[in-house]
Image: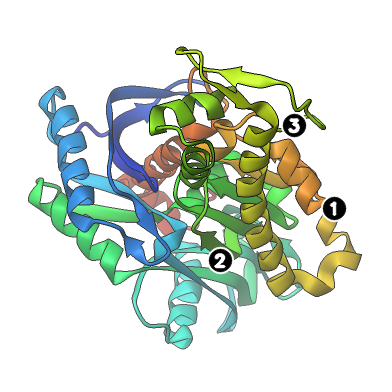
Amino acid sequence: MSNESVAVLDIRSYEVTFLIGAKGVNGTFVFRGSRSEKYEGYSSDGFLDAASFRRAVISAVTSVSQNYEGTIKEIYVGVPTAFTKVYTKGHTISFPSKRKISVQEIDALYESGLNELLAPGRCIRRSDMYFALGDNRKYFNASELCGIPTASLKGALCYYFVSDEFYDAADSVLKELGFENVHFIPQSLSEANYLLSEKMREGYAFLLDMGFLSSSVSVVYGNGIVHEESFDCGLGYILVSLMQGLGVDYETAEEILSSANVSGGAVSKDLMWTDGSGAAYSVREINEIVKYGLDELCESVDKFFEKYYRDKSTMGFAANPLSVTGEGIGGIKGAAEHISKRLSRMTEIVCPDLPYYDKPLFSSRIALLATALSDKKKSGLLYKIFNIFGGKNK
């Protein structure tokens, strides 16, 4: 694969997407191949059918590889929240005398913190909420520390662990497909860093990713995830409820949901939705079914905030907006407004600021691509040499 391109595998709860992309101009990307394949999906208990996942990955990768002129040696894989566990740790290291901070000192802080953490499993990534020196001033960008003399270095650190089930399933099939290096990236972290501004992340920021079979909520601070959970609810469950409640097939349920709008108030009981064959269904009943499905998600999110942040409601914590994304939020008109009313919290839909890809459906794959390109740049020889000498990188 050429130096400027990366291969990524985005794994959602109903389809996988394999793509090869490169950095374009003005924050855009150049796509050199992309293919999505549906599969059985996953829940909080793991893959519903590991064999279907394997088939989908093989099909997507093979389809793109056949039409790509180049050799693909490495791949970046997004790990869904359902397969990720985050550990946070405040940690400090001291030096015998003052020294200028470089990448080596920051790496030492991370390694020392991980050794003390003693967490089981496979750590796939680390990040920081912030760093601090002796004066306790917070630094949200590690590059700002480089070159500053200090006798101690502190950090509010985050470590991301992947489940063995996911790692084994993804690593084995990708190695068989010829990838020599498989890199794993937490999906929620890549979305948070790409979709939410640095300024927003310097205070508590909240990200809700509504998927098809699985949704997740993450609390973001700086460049790290403080807490997160995934829930077995999403667009697919609402479609099933429509099929059962209205007695329709899957295709009709999709048509009904695509035309539904739950942002308004009461609907007349006489208002009907009619399909191509003339069959009519009550719009009021449709909206009630959709709202019930959204309410189940809201209840899970509400319990999450109650669990971790019950005592922060008086500190302006509840005033921070909830950023929402994912195919679920883009597939239901008025969903963000309904969630806002249900949780009594301001919501805003976030998605890539790109032509054609400016939809919540594309958030995870574009965020993963952006993270992969950043990782590849940092793994370059010139970048490493520059930072050995404590240079500030942008």
User: How far apart are labels 2 and 3 at the CA level?
Assistant: 52 Å
Image mark for residue 101: 2
Q: Secondary structure at mark 3?
A: loop
Q: Quadrant of residue 331?
A: top right
Residue type at mark 1: give it. Ala
Say which residue label 3 marks.
263
Local packing at callout 3 (Cα closer than 10 Å; few below 14, some 14-19, many 20+) is some
Residue type at mark 3: give it. Ser
Q: Secondary structure at mark 1?
A: helix
Say which residue label 1 marks.
319
Q: Residue at image x 64%, y 57%?
A: 220
Mark 2 or mark 3: name the one nearer the start of the chain: 2
Q: Residue 32: horizontal and vertical position, in percent?
A: 27, 23
Q: Residue 173: horizontal and vertical position, in percent?
A: 15, 53
Give the answer, above or below, for where 208 lies relative to 138: above
Closest to the observer: 341 or 379? 341
Q: Residue 301: horizontal and vertical position, in percent?
A: 66, 59
Give the answer, above or below, for where 244 lies relative to 359: below
**Would you say residue 213 is visible in this rendering?**
yes
User: How far apart are labels 3 and 1 at the CA level?
Assistant: 21 Å
Question: Going by the image, does 310 lie left or right of 285?
Answer: right
Mark 1 or mark 2: name the one nearer the start of the chain: 2
Q: Residue at image x 16%, y 45%?
A: 55
Q: Give the foreground label among 2 and 3.
A: 3
